[in-house]
Amino acid sequence: MKRHILIALGAASLLTLASCGEDFLYKAPQGSIDQAALTNEQGVELLVTNAYGYLTDTEGFENMFNWVFGGLYGGDNNKGSDTNDQSVLNSVETYSISPSNDYLLVKWRQTYYGAKRCNLAIQVLNEAEIDATLRSTRIAEMKFLRTMYYFEGVKMFSSKGVPYIDETMAAEDNDPKVHNGVDIYPQLLADIDEAIAGLPETQSEVGRANKTAAKALKAKMLMQQGDLASAKPILKDVIENGLSPKGERLALQDNLNNNFNALTENGKEGIFEVQFSVGANNNGNYGMCLNYPHNSGPGGCCGFDQPSNELANSFQVDANGLPYLNFEYRQHPEKPVTYRKDSDNALSENDNSIAVDPRIDFTMGRFGIPYKDWGLPNKDWVRDVNNGGFYMPKKHVYTKEMQENGLAGSSYSAGWAPGSAMNLQYLSLRDMKLLYAECLADAGDLAGAMAQVNDIRRRAGLDVNIIKLEDGTPAANYKISEYPASHAAFSDKATCIKAVRMERKLELAMEGQRFFDLARWGGDYMNSELNAYLAYERNFLNKFNGVSAPPAAKTMFPIPETQIQTMGNDENGQPYLVQPDPWK
């Protein structure tokens, strides 16, 4: 058996082919490289870079930042745009998704395309004649990445839904057939442990994973698995001793915007960032390219990913500057923070008699509030208010300064869509601190949990995070406070858990995490929260009339039907891929 690698459009698109036969009958395909030719330092670096490169893939309008399945399905955002554009997403936001949904197929492929690149790199690394330390480090990087790709599949389709294929299986069969139905968490945890052992504390290039990143990924996996006790010491270590991609001691950025800016990326709050660029390859995060304000807004396309009314009103605070842990704002839908205005002079107005957490205007665009450094939004920045509401995505949208510095533009994703060189943080300190707060609350250390929450809230209230009008006055009625020691969250475990969960909702809003949080907190909780979200949202958008949340058993998504058909049956007539019971 001989194995070859085709190089298409440069080293970034490497594929494997196999052929059998006598040597004198064999002729290598044009444009191919025998795998043995890559068993050197230059070859393995090409393959390793290729595996990293898939993090920025351009296959579909959804990537590992999960604006569709983490955000839209979790109630953070509406689809936006209009009803007809990307109509396949209408079934996602109304919880009527089926196994034939094309976006599910994209997510499934991303798991295995990414894993295959890692497997190929590991195969060659094992045979390469290179420095032993370099080999060990690069294999550890590939095991980190492979775990990350599989973890995305696990979050989507469950740990028993996706089969595990490593480099040994791939070496024996270029298209291995493996049954699902077996929990793959043990293999993933074993892989990430090897990554932790093999990765250095710091890397010479900021885009590579270091030891802190591997520990953070393991902790995140354990939390999704529900093993808070095992995650707790790892999170503590990451928070107290972890290093950023540049080797800095991890710490919260004072300025929230520094985490979403190409001019300040790879900073002290990031743990693992996917590196985007806007050079000749137009690699400006294609997975988010629909999610910019419409028409005259930055990017000029396409009006998707509009924050939900429910999310916006989650930022309401009480007289003490604290969130409503019992969701009191849902009981008064007639008094939202932003309401529709019938006059032609404005699409909507903000009710400044209502105090709000300042993170609302960091998270989403509102009419009458400065939108980063672009000034006030125009009415045409929203494509169809009756379909998506009147809020606009904001966190990942580039600034005018970035555009003026050649780091962003209206055609920097695949040459036609908006994009920027802004990294997106897959693993961050803010996420780790709130996961650690969950562990502390679960273990009964309520004061410790609330100390982590208050760190997050203290940062949010800094003056640099208060959006100002041109005259220097706050743009809205901002109010945020730390929880005082007298608050029930310090003495009652149930209240503490509520406070931690609400803080995750506010701090990580529009970052594609919401549904996966709801799912790991349990099916009953997920069902209850999504039904409450729908009950509130339908006060503003008629499309949610009659819509119900997924039942408690559906904390995962269905496996794409085409994949079940493609994999087929084994020699005993049993299908390799079986749909999870709740979706049968």
Image: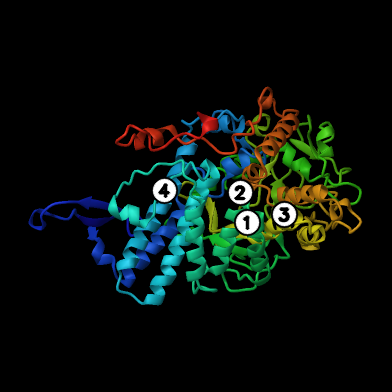
Give how far across and how far down residue 552 sits, in percent.
Answer: 64, 34
Q: Residue at x 70, y 40 (%)?
A: 391
**Which residue lies under the disc numbered 1?**
400
**Which residue lies under the disc numbered 2?**
298
Q: CA distance from mark 2 to mark 1?
A: 8 Å
Q: In this image, 391 relative to 583: left or right? A: right
The reply to whether the C-beta atoms of the residues labelled 1 and 3 are less than 8 Å apart is no
Mark earlier in primary sequence (2, 1): 2
Q: Secondary structure at mark 1?
A: helix
Q: Secondary structure at mark 2?
A: loop
Mark earlier in primary sequence (1, 3): 1
Residue 581 is labelled as none
Mark earlier in primary sequence (4, 1): 4
Residue ranking furthest to the front: 572
Q: Secondary structure at mark 4?
A: helix
Going by the numbered disc 3, the residue's amino acid type is Glu
